[in-house]
Amino acid sequence: MHGSILRHSIQNPRNACCYILANKPNTVRRSYSSISVAYDHSTNPATTANDTLVDTFSRRHNYLRISLTERCNLRCTYCMPEEGVPLTPNAQLLTKEEILHLARLFVEQGVTKIRLTGGEPTVRSDIVELVQGIGKLKTRGLESLAMTSNGIALKRKLPALYEAGLDTINLSLDTLNPHLFEIMTRRKGFDKVIGSIDEAIRLGIPHVKINTVVMRGINDQEVLDFVSYTKDRPVNVRFIEYMPFDGNRWGKNKLVPYAELKGNIESKFGRLVKVRDGPNDTTKHYQLPGYKGRIGFITSMTDHFCSTCNRLRITADGSIKVCLFGNTEVSLRDLMREGKTNEELVQVISTAVKKKKRQHADNSSKYRFNHLMPFHSLPPITHSGFLASNQRLYSSKSDSDPRLTHTDPETGEARMVSVTDKVPTKREAKAIGRIILPEHAYELLKKNDAHSPKGDVLTVAKIAGIQAAKSTSNLIPLCHPLLLGLIDVRLWLDDHRKSVECESIVQTSGKTGVEMEALTATSVALLTVYDMCKAATKEMKIENIRVVEKTGGKSGPWKTSIKENV
């Protein structure tokens, strides 16, 4: 069911949710002339691919979502009325040539992933030609070409789309019950959607995803069925928190928070194994041992991801939206039809990107719940203009040479680095490690980790890791004390290595990073395993303790390039 309200906020620029955006009362469309004050022909500086798509918070936008149409062949109850909605005249929609022109232009500026959305993309008669044209950009820097579909008219087109370069398909499906499907979409077609999923798997499309918006009292009872669906199928089912949009009669009572969903799943299937997420992922990925597929949670309401947003959207009528919730659109269609050069288009795009706000506009206070992290607690950001900022909070790269900041460059003596003048930002670090045990000790632990007279080994180790992270500044002399917002220590058994694996994630809103806290948590958790198992053996080896990922701060996001040996 492609028209889901939340789905469009996360995946699609205008999407099948044309009713909501077409009737959004405060949406303001701005033409080229309305931003002429920001674009000065007389001082037109060359905008390079290095900074065109970087906003004033140093977020680099390399992900473009292009809406191909406002039309949809479903009438989902939470998306649009049964009779449909007023549609933009065809003459005002982007042509195939204009779409390909913009796709090429954005790839030249650094976009590496393009997703085609709607409405429903497959209702366009030229969808295969569009995918073929965009697929050719993979020789010019494009790395991924994705499409979101409701699957109704997809199956017969999939072979040609896959051959043309489509490598990711997101299928919208909110229920596994054919009867409920017909009620929710006001249309038949459940078997067609399942057929499209099966065909995508048969073809070997690398990434097959199912988007499921969870609504309390409607389909939340099917979450466990969707998890079971991943057992024998290499698909990624993403559960999406129901999000408010004008017109979908959203109510807080319909929202099922991510934490509740995860708890319900683990109470049935056991502990979920965390899968490593990318620095700009909107999904928290997990997997059950032995399952071919994965599950994920898109937590737009309870843990939004504005700070790492790397997405831009082009609407079906050719406007760029730097944020789905923003109330300003700039028409690139008008500029192209006025004969503006690529250089002029790039400058307008850059101006729009640099006006992007820190978080989605006007929604944080209107729909914030008491249990949400108070994003307003971060310090305000001020600018003397939108083309430049002295405060770069998120994902910039450091241009300076590597150096030991805890060593005085003149005397060589140890020193604490001053963070007094730094601006607090959201920081996160992830550290991993393992302890390898002899087979007999591992089997004891595997059979029942309560064999230790000191108690439940993994639980005690987890608590020790959490305590250690909070004590890092007392253990490491030059570390700053930090108020930590999250410490998540996870330990699990690895039968292949005969090891206990550990992963620690630490978050804060502060002036310095939390890599040391994550490392300390992992180290002490593994030391605790050693302590509790040493009665059975002393031949244990702790190894591979390292930071694998971090976000926030001046240097921006970082992810290890070291490949794990299996």
Image: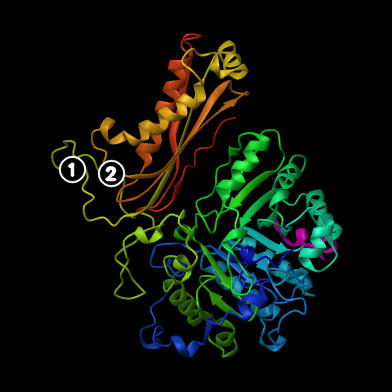
Q: Amino acid at mark 2?
A: Arg
Magenta stretch contains residue 72: no
Q: Viewed as shown, does residue 282 lie left or right of 194? A: left
**Residue at 68% over, 50% down:** 237
x then y, percent, for residue 147: 69, 63
State whether residue 260 appears in this view: yes
Q: Quadrant of residue 482?
A: top left
Q: Residue furthest left?
A: 411
Whether pointer 2 and pointer 1 mark residues with C-beta atoms closer than 8 Å, the reply is yes
Left or right of 482 on screen, residue 226: right
Quadrant of the frame with the C terminus: top right
- Range of the magenta residues? 151-170
Q: Which mark is residue 403?
A: 2
Residue at screen point 34% across, 46% down: 513
Residue 98 higher or lower than 365, as above or below: below
Q: Position of residue 123 (x, y in %)?
A: 78, 73
Q: Amino acid at mark 1?
A: Pro
Would you name the residue on which mark 1 appears? Answer: 409
Q: Which image quarter is the N terminus in?
A: bottom right
| Left or right position of 552 against 32 | left
Q: Can residue 158 be seen at all in this image of the molecule?
A: no
